[in-house]
Image (cartoon, rainbow, N blue to C red):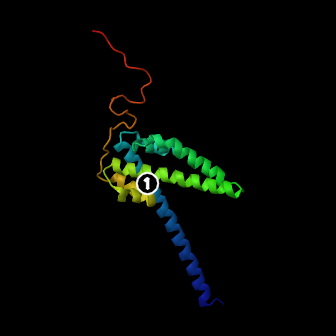
């Protein structure tokens, strides 16, 4: 014979399962919207949207769009070395690794500030990009903001020449 507590336990377990599924579906929707928002950011900046789907390359492009590509090697070095060192058993190496990761996060925060400035937003929006990144990427991608720099983030300032040209321009005689 079953009593009421067995029914309540079964109901509670099924409600928890429904809640877990709803959270998983919500995070998947947020991830897809964030990916679409990043694609839109790239197209606003004049970069092919598919480049937002390649993990490390998209980080490089993010730094280029934010006009802070000179910081990317330091960011990559700090994050790579930091994660490698923080996984060791030595205490002093873990502290150094944590410091490098924090330095990489600081560089990333500077890049987010410059990204928000590139689209006409201020430090408050940069804080949103740092702490609530997926939501603010969606806002930045689907919002009305426009990219304020050259459409080709690889252009050198003042020269008008793209960094992607492999051979020099030929002068034709007429």
| Residue 157 point in image, percent of width and height | 35, 34
Q: Residue at x 67, y 54 (%)?
A: 93
Pointer 1 residue: 34
- Check the image and name the residue furthest to the front: 92
Q: Residue at x 56, y 72 (%)?
A: 17
Question: In the depicted view, which residue is nearer to us: 94 or 44?
Answer: 94
Q: Quadrant of residue 166?
A: top left
In the rendered structure, the answer to whether residue 15 lies left or right of residue 50 reads: right
Q: Residue at x 50, y 67 (%)?
A: 23
**Is 68 rendered above or below residue 22?**
above
Specify few, some or many for label 1: CA neighbours under 10 Å numbering under 14, 14-19, or 20 or more.
many
| Residue 32 point in image, percent of width and height | 45, 54
| Residue 69 point in image, percent of width and height | 45, 41
| Position of the C terminus by quadrant | top left
| Position of the N terminus by quadrant | bottom right
Q: Residue at x 41, y 49 (%)?
A: 38
């Amino acid at each position: 014979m079953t009593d009421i507590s067995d029914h309540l336990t079964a109901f509670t377990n099924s409600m928890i399962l429904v809640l877990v599924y709803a959270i998983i579906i919500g995070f998947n929707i947020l991830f897809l919207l964030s990916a679409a928002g990043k694609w839109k950011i790239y197209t606003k900046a004049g970069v092919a949207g598919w480049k937002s789907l390649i993990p490390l390359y998209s980080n490089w492009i993010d730094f280029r769009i934010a006009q802070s590509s000179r910081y990317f090697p330091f960011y990559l070095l700090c994050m790579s070395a930091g994660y490698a060192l923080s996984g060791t058993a030595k205490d002093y190496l873990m502290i150094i690794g944590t410091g490098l990761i924090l330095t990489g996060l600081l560089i990333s925060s500077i890049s987010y500030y410059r990204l928000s400035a590139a689209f006409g937003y201020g430090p408050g929006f940069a804080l949103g990009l740092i702490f609530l990144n997926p939501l603010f990427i969606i806002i930045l991608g689907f919002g009305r903001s426009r990219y304020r720099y050259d459409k080709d983030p690889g252009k050198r300032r003042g020269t008008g020449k793209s960094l992607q040209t492999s051979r020099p321009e030929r002068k034709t005689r007429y």
